[in-house]
Image (cartoon, rainbow, N blue to C red):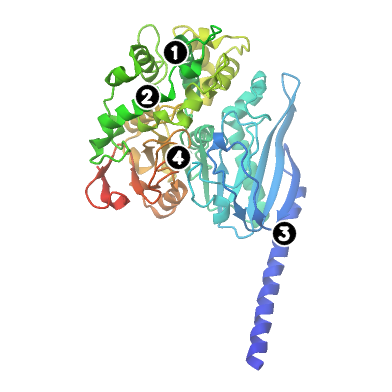
Amino acid sequence: MKKSTALSGFVALVVAAQNGMAQTEQNQCLALKDVVIPNTQITAVKWFAGGVLPQDEQSSFTGASESQTKAEAHCVVNGEIEKYQGADGKPYAIGFQLRLPQNWNKKFLFQGGGGLDGFLAPAVGAVPVRGSNAQPALMRGYAVVTMDGGHQGARDTAFTADQQARLNYAYAATGKVTATAKRLIAQMYQTQPEHSYFMGCSNGGREAMNAAMRYPLEFDGVVAGNPGFRLSRAAMGEAWDNQQFMKFAPTNEKGEKIVANALTQADLDAVAKGVLARCDAKDGLEDGIINAWESCDFKPEMVKKEIGAQKVALLNAIFNGAKNSRGENVYSSWPYDAGINTQGWRQWKHGDSQTAQPNSRNFTMGVASLKEYFMTPRNPDFDTLKFDFDKDPAKVAQISGINDADKTDLSTFRSRGGKMIIFEGVSDPVFSAHDLRDWYRQLQADMQATEQFARVFMIPGMNHCGGGPAFEDIDPLTALEQWVENGNAPAYLVGKAGKALPDKNKTMPICAYPHVATYKGGDMSKADSFECR
């Protein structure tokens, strides 16, 4: 009885101590509402005792998983930085959310946005691939911050009327939010993070690359997924695609052009089948995955019998990339891959609307972005279907200089031990895998031994930030941690089968470019039956 009583007393003391620590951290959290930071207002502070977190309503742009997430106790801080009245007479500020876990691992993660930003996603730090089941950063013990890019309204281009709002969206908000977040972290935990990372997909991937390029003293590593690193050029590429689809679109009984029917599902299925027939075996195994994507020499003429000459011409126009009258690429060409016949490809390129109003994102988002953000001067009345690829690219040069994350001087980032992991879907319909490859080749030429600090991983079959017949269940954050903190450079990421693949237990190495996952024999469903060559 005495031993039992003593043990019970010890347990009670431990519980009391834990409760006391939790109460202390809760008090430290609530005290953050009184922290004074120049040009910053703390608008809300609360202690989250644990449970299900709110979902990211813009996950189709950020790549965040759509599954529900649970978290342990943490502090939630919302605030606004640099409130001002814009040139258009409207109020602006950089909204942010910071989540500070009770059990902190002494690390900080900046979670990137998506699209035009304008929304505040829950600061969870999920790996930004819709098919990834990797543990979010908050659950690993990270302090995580998100932001809205300096304006409100997802998909709303009105902010482009203000100079400072443009600058904040382009890059400046990242630096301001980072400084504020680190100040609040120091106040909460009485110390600075030992490691700081940035992770995002799409525009969040661009923000991640910009974090390394424009704030090399602030971040130890970044994960950039399907990055819109040359958004300005990609916007011109969207205009090119729209013009081609409109040119080849069939008309309905009213004489209206139906863009969605320029390439039917049967057409796209025939193309995907032709691509696989031509290129699937190049990696040593016919399994529906084109690992040797760069050596795929498919031409749409190979399926001319199935789709007809006119659609062959349309595919050539699109996949050869936007060009001027001299035949020079204004935006990159595109690789042929097995994900061309998926919903994720269609919803960006030409949609499924059976009316005269196209509903693809190239039309619904790309048009407004090009004429109101990427072109100078801003011209909401501009008809992008009349974009002149000889004259009008010059109008995009101003914004590309501050917006695009295509710099190749990463000397400070590298010298401090910074690491960069970039992944891209080969079937991404909005940002070309060829464009990212070409930038990486330039980085290799400009910096030498690039693989010591920056590696690119191409994911065959994957669309934009997930989807498609791909091994999209990856965990690049763990790979980045191992590289930065332990010096273990990733030769490959282990990819697990996504929803669109029939064998859910199959795994595949996603090799660091330019290496190709090549079948060497053994169980075809196991990653160790392949090697990176």
Pointer 3 with pointer 1, Cβ within 8 A: no
Q: Sequence order check: which comes first, mark 4 or mark 2? A: 2
Pointer 3 with pointer 2, Cβ within 8 A: no
Residue 334 is marked as 2
Identify which amino acid the numbered label 2 is placed on. Trp
Q: Observer-nearest residue: 356 or 290?
A: 356
Regarding residue 17, the answer to whether it shows in the image is yes
Q: Observer-nearest residue: 415 or 419?
A: 419
Residue 244 is marked as 1
For discs 4 and 2, the disc positioned in front in the rendered view: 2
Q: How many callouts does the rendering have?
A: 4
Above or below, 527 relative to 446: below
Q: Secondary structure at mark 2?
A: loop
Q: Report, in whole angstroms, how far the alpha carbon at label 1 lies from the one at label 4.
A: 41 Å
For discs 3 and 2, the disc positioned in front in the rendered view: 2
Q: Secondary structure at mark 3?
A: helix
Residue located 57% across and 55% down the image: 139
Q: Sequence order check: which comes first, mark 2 or mark 1? A: 1
Q: Position of residue 337 (x, y in %)?
A: 35, 30
